[in-house]
């Protein structure tokens, strides 16, 4: 073969090659330009697009602007005001630093820059067509920077061919602006697409107001505050209650030192914190900013700066997991408070960052006393309230955190009042009914007189032998008795770790299955033994069951085993942690009270007590609601009295 001559590429070709990494789609252009505006100290940013950004993109800000000299340098490759030497990468307080964005964008579009600092009388206008600078003139213009990008990829048809539909590209830009707005609630964002306003945020610094503007009131009212800090990591923001779910991670905005990132480890920490509270197909809402020392991260690992590396993943994982579990174990009545993702000192770093070359590259510097009730000896053993803790993370090699036991329900100081004659009972009257009502047979719940401070919620009765209606002083509660009992049993089983009580069967149970099921059971027999299930092969297509968890009834034994074999066949990969969790789910579900089972008032009361003393009284282990609260304000609104 003939040796080919090595030669330097011309500047425009080099810029177009770089654009392939930096400018993947119209949303990439918007990201670079808006982050430049944030670096320039702007607190008002307006984005206008046509044709999904392929025809027209305009970004207008009120930032610091640039002089003519700096504007000319800003469109040159590797010209930046963010860093001076390589060591500055260890102390980045800006979103960008490479100086590649503007020249890359200008090389694949018709590009126009209009900028003016407050100290200049005239603005500077620079036009570039496909990488060739056409003109640079002085003209009139407002303080700040306006950048217009037209005919994106007009000279790179191969790249333009792979763009999605106009609607899809528009959605990508909308999702991006949404995340940028959540990262900076102190900045007013506005997005206009094809002359229609898509979104607008208040820019008042309140993250709750920003969430309300972007996702609506219903989402903003279902938030839990996250505010955690230790010596190395700080986590602030909001997560959604377990009932607030999306089919993808679209509702999850993750930030590190104010920078939007994607990170599998952080996403896994969120999944583990919500484990046993949401369905496997659901993803919770989250807006979280992780603050760490800039020297402990590397942001220079991806052309679009969307990924990040931590020097110690384990520390960040533990902090994130604890921050979320603390938030999820707060009382159900906890309301989100106004919270900024960045505290005053961190925000000051953003505000004080002077961008001498602002448009170079994204950057930011970034009710009565308890009644004693004697329980007949004939009633079956009661469920005892237990302290529970998520053990999944520990089972997977991480240190699990056990939040301090919190008193979910306060005990108000009421004096006892004699029962009234109204047909609707008060809380005091409900307690008196306990002593008068005949016992109704139940093979699960028993009254143990262990109120544990839960003295504000009292049952009124059952609906369709499935739902418990209860009341407090100012709220109505609806409880799914099966889901509630399932949560109680599951938490009790989790707390028992590897010591799950087992019952030896008097006569072994033999079940016909497939040869494949027998092999799967044999492979994991040791794990099953630790979970109280003694099951082994009794032939090529038969299983012998000698013991089961003590909560499983004999009538449910065969169904329980068949569910185990079905679960094993459906799992792609089987690890001890997943196997344990699935078995605990099945055990709790099979042992729990069923829909249609009659409970007396004392049993309903005990169920409510035990549920409120779990760490997660909102949902069952499968993610379905256990208890729904309707406060008086909602009732007034429901009946249109407000």
Image (cartoon, rainbow, N blue to C red):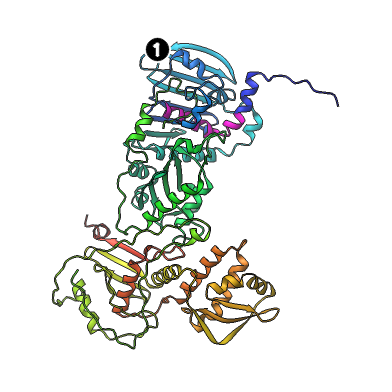
Along the viewing direction, whichever of 10 and 528 lies nearer the viewer:
528
Quadrant of the image occupied by residue 598: bottom left
Query: In this picture, is 538 found above or below 92?
Result: below
For the point 51% across and 61% down, which residue is it?
A: 395
Report if residue 289 lies within the magenta region.
Answer: no
Indicate the quadrant containing the C terminus: top left, top right, bottom left or bottom right.
bottom left
* Few, some or many residues within 10 Å of mark 1 (<14, 14–19, 20+): some
Q: Is the magenta region chiefly helix, strand or loop?
A: helix
109 with respect to 603 (left or right): right
Q: Position of residue 10 (x, y in %)?
A: 66, 18
Q: Which residues are magenta?
A: 19-39
193 with respect to 559 (left or right): left
Report if residue 21 lies within the magenta region.
Answer: yes
Query: In this picture, is 235 found above or below 22?
Result: below
Residue that label 1 marks: 122
Along the viewing direction, whichever of 491 and 102 lies nearer the viewer:
491
Indicate the quadrant containing the N terminus: top left, top right, bottom left or bottom right.
top right
Along the viewing direction, whichever of 2 and 430 lies nearer the viewer:
2
Q: Position of residue 287 (x, y in %)?
A: 41, 45
Res 71 visible: yes
Quadrant of the image occupied by residue 340: top left
Along the viewing direction, whichever of 65 and 78 lies nearer the viewer:
78
Judging from the image, what secondary structure is the residue with disc 1 in? loop
593 with respect to 335 (left or right): right
Query: In this picture, is 500 found above or below 249?
Result: below
For the point 32% across and 59% down, which residue is it?
A: 332
For the point 61% across and 65% down, which residue is it?
A: 570
Q: Position of residue 310 (x, y in %)?
A: 51, 42
């Amino acid at each position: 073969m003939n040796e080919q001559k090595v030669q330097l590429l011309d500047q425009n070709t080099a810029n177009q090659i770089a654009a392939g990494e930096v400018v993947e789609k119209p949303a990439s252009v918007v990201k670079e330009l808006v982050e430049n505006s944030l670096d320039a100290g702007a607190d008002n940013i307006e984005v206008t697009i046509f044709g999904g950004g392929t025809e027209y993109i305009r970004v207008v800000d009120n930032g610091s602007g640039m002089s003519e000299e700096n504007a000319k340098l800003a469109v040159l490759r590797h010209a930046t005001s963010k860093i001076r030497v390589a060591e500055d990468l260890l102390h980045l307080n800006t979103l960008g630093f490479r100086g590649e964005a503007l020249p890359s964008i200008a090389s694949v579009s018709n590009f126009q820059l209009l900028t003016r600092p407050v100290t200049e009388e005239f603005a500077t206008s620079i036009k570039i067509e496909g990488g060739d600078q056409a003109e640079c003139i002085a003209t009139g213009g407002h303080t700040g920077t306006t950048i217009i990008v037209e005919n994106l990829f007009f000279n790179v048809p191969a790249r333009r061919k792979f763009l999605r539909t106009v609607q899809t590209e528009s959605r990508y830009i909308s999702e991006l602006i949404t995340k940028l707005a959540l990262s900076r609630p102190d900045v007013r964002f506005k997005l206009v697409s094809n002359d229609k306003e898509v979104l607008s945020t208040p820019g008042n610094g309140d993250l709750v107001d920003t969430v309300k503007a972007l996702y609506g009131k219903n989402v903003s009212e279902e938030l839990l505050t996250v505010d955690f800090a230790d010596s190395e990591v700080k986590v602030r923001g909001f997560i959604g209650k377990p009932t607030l779910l999306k089919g993808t991670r679209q509702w999850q905005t993750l930030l590190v030192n104010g920078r939007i990132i994607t990170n599998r480890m952080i996403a896994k920490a969120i999944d583990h914190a919500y484990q046993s509270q949401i369905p496997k197909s659901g993803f919770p809402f989250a807006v979280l900013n992780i603050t760490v020392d800039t020297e402990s991260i590397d942001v220079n690992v991806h052309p679009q700066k969307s990924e990040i590396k931590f020097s110690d993943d384990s520390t960040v994982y533990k902090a994130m997991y604890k921050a979320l579990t603390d938030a999820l174990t707060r009382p159900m009545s906890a309301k989100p408070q106004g919270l900024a993702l960045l505290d005053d000192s961190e925000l000051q770093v953003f505000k004080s960052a002077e961008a001498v070359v602002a448009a170079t590259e994204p950057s930011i510097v970034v009710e009565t006393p308890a009644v004693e009730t004697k329980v007949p000896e004939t009633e079956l053993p009661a469920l005892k309230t237990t302290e529970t803790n998520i053990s999944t993370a520990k089972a997977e090699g991480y240190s699990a955190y056990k939040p301090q036991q919190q008193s979910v329900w306060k005990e108000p100081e009421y004096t006892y009042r004699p029962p009234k004659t109204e047909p609707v009972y008060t809380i005091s009257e409900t307690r008196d009914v306990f002593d008068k009502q005949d016992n109704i047979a139940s093979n699960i719940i028993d009254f143990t007189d262990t109120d544990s401070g839960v003295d504000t919620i009292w049952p009124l009765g059952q609906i369709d032998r499935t739902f418990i209606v209860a009341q407090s002083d100012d709220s109505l509660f609806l409880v799914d008795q099966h889901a509630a009992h399932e949560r109680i049993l599951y938490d009790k089983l989790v707390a028992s770790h590897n010591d799950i009580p087992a019952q030896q069967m008097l006569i072994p149970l033999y079940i016909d299955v497939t040869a494949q099921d027998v092999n799967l059971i044999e492979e994991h027999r040791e794990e099953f033994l630790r979970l109280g299930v003694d099951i082994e092969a009794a032939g090529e297509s038969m299983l012998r069951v000698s013991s089961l968890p003590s909560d499983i009834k004999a009538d449910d034994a065969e169904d329980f085993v068949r569910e185990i074999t079905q679960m094993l066949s459906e799992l792609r990969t089987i690890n001890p942690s997943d196997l344990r969790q699935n078995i605990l789910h099945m055990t709790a579900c099979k042992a729990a009270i069923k829909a249609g089972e009659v409970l007396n008032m004392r049993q309903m009361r005990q169920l409510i007590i035990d549920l409120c003393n779990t760490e997660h009284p909102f949902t069952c282990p499968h993610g379905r609601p256990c208890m729904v609260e309707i406060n008086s304000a909602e009732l007034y609104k429901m009946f249109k009295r407000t």
